[in-house]
Amino acid sequence: MACMRLPKKKQHAKIFAWLRDNYNFKCVFFFQILQDSLQDLSQQIIDKASGRDLDTLTEKDRQQMCYDMYRLYVIGNDLHGVASTKYSINVFSKIFICKVIVQALGLFEETKGAANEKKTRSVSKMFEKDSMVLFHNIREQLIRLLHERGSWLTTVDSLRQSLKYMWDLVLRIEIPSKSIETAFIGYVRDELKTKLQTGLYDVLLIVYCQCHNQFGSVVQDILSALAFKALEKGQIIPTYGYQTQEDAKRRYAELLSSVFETHWKGMTDDQMFQEAIKWTPFAHFLDMFYQADQHLGQESGLQLIKAISAVEDRMNQLKSGTILVKDHSVICANFEQFEKLIMLMMKKDKREMDPTYLRQLVDLRSKELQAFLEVYGLVTELINMCSRFEVDIVALERKHRSLQNIHDVPIAHLCTPGKLDNIMRPEDYRPVVAAFDLSPEELDLLPQMKHCSTSLVFTNKWDSTGHRMKRQKERKLSVSETFEHVWEQSITWWNTIKGKIKQGTMTFQEFDKIFGKHDCQIIETEFNLMEENGTWIKERMAQIQLFRDLENCVEGARIILQVVAAYGLNGDFKPIELITSVMKGTDIAMNALDQSLRQICSILGGVQEKHITCLREFINCEPLILWLKESMPSGLKELKVFVDLATISAGEGDIEIAKVRCLHSATTGYAPLIFNLNDEYRLQRLP
């Protein structure tokens, strides 16, 4: 029988029903199904919490998640109530139930808190059971369970099993809410610490020395603190046959030496440093044996000195800026432990340090590292831009490739290291990147160059300027020459056309030379590169579209005026005449384009190339048209009679019949123009 992955409500209901109906069932197999189901449910909650940014949830999604988590912890609480009455349910299953409840409750609080300004009375009514009251109840019941089932701490085996399979299991619970996690883990940790302080210290020390690697960081920290307290105050350690307290103390010192030697054996300097700020017990070793390692064995004492030296070296490198990037990353990831070690050493040496100094120092180096990473990306773009024509970038490319992996590179090789003591306002500090031998002025230009490099118009100008400068120099350009000549000329030109377009003084003829016939979407993208969301962009795009519409309409307008001239029409065709006069010379400024022409464009929008061809033929056939109008004043009726007579006269000759049919088809198609066109025809009535 396999555990099915079911929706939360149904899965809880299934477990609830099973507990209710099988409370005397003691099959281990079913208990495994229960634990697997709960573990799967727990993982679903953690996945939900880690898979999205709660602050960006829509109101609908936020309410749905709140409801799901509320339903989950309420049903879970009912499930826990039933499980508490079933003595056949083992302690691990009860812990798993509490785990799911606390996790669901944590995600509920976190989701609700992500938009607490949106809380309303109706939302409060929806969640009738107070989450924090339920949280405190579950926490108290869990502590009671741990005290009842995990109270056998008098032997090494009982203490180890109680810690590993109960307390450590609870203290490793991952909770989506930081505040809930702090309240939960902190409370359980304090309860365990109090409980262990009432036990036998020799048992505790043996478990610590023999089994410390089996526990999570919280239990390790508690055991370390109590173990060193026991060692420091030898009088509280039972002698158990030893002659003096000093003998007992020496015995546990030997155990601790064994722990240290085993854990640190064969480590390199890098490994020792990383382990020192990751291994929780190291702070206790440092506090106990710094400059007083007489209780440690010779080998462990030497290892401790090396580990302390490794930490001190990184501190000095952090000050000077010579720290490796990988070591800085380790410090950032374990800052609290690193700070704790440094402050302990300062205290032991009777030296003082501003509480914020270390944080500021680490942040200073972080700024330098971030500045380098940003410049590295910009230099990548510089190399790409220089590759568009001949530039001597061999040295720059070599340096760029060598810095692809900077884990083992000192930060001082990337940036000129700042001295924290000389910086008045660390928050305003601007690092100087020195890795690429570019001047500060050139570095300042790189962000703008990257921005402009995405513009088709700018890169066209960049390319033409670069090739022209190369021909003038008759050799490859240097990087500095590229900045001085190619960049300066290109950006000056770019700013000039940007100003003319923004003000609307650029003519359409000049615009077409620069931008070509790209579609409006590409042109709008170019404009946004000039000034993102500029208030002028919408107006310019409308003018460009109108001008293009006019270009499409001008042929239609010209052929209509030819019809007007050919047939002597006297109607109002001034709008048509206006379009042709405007488009006679296309060198018109954008802001000078008459917006009233838009209405005329809408009238002529339906005139297509086939219509223009037809009108052109209509003009060419003027003699025939005039003859038809004069011969058939009644229009189509007379045409029909004429066609019938012509057909009879044609006899059976194929050619004559085809001529008649051709005349009939053409005349019928052009009938509105032939028979309805008069001297007073206007633009709106023109077919």
Image (spheres, rainbow, N blue to C red):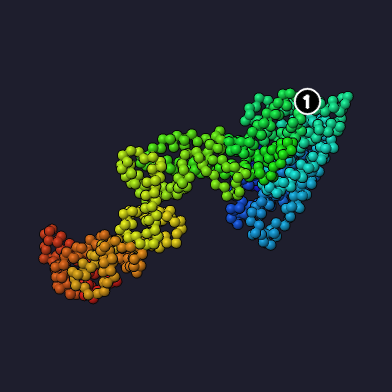
Q: Eyeballing the image, is 593 above or below 128?
A: below
Relative side of 663 to 264, left or right: left
Q: Looking at the picture, how far across and down is residue 625, in whole percent? A: 17, 68
Question: Quarter of the image containing the N terminus?
Answer: top right
Locate the C terminus and report the quarter of the image it occupies: bottom left
Q: Is residue 687 visible?
A: no
Question: Between residues 532 and 684, which one lies in front from this camera angle?
Answer: 532
Camera-side residue: 35 or 597? 597
Q: Residue 4, percent across and down? A: 64, 41
For disc 1, the marked residue is 254
Judge whether 419 appears above or below 237 on screen. below
Farthest front residue in view = 422
Residue at the spot x=36%, y=40% of the render? 477
What residue is at 14 percent from the left and 72 percent from the top? 631
Looking at the picture, which amino acid does disc 1 mark?
Glu
Of residues 371 and 353, the one nearer the viewer is 353
Residue 329 appears in the figure? yes
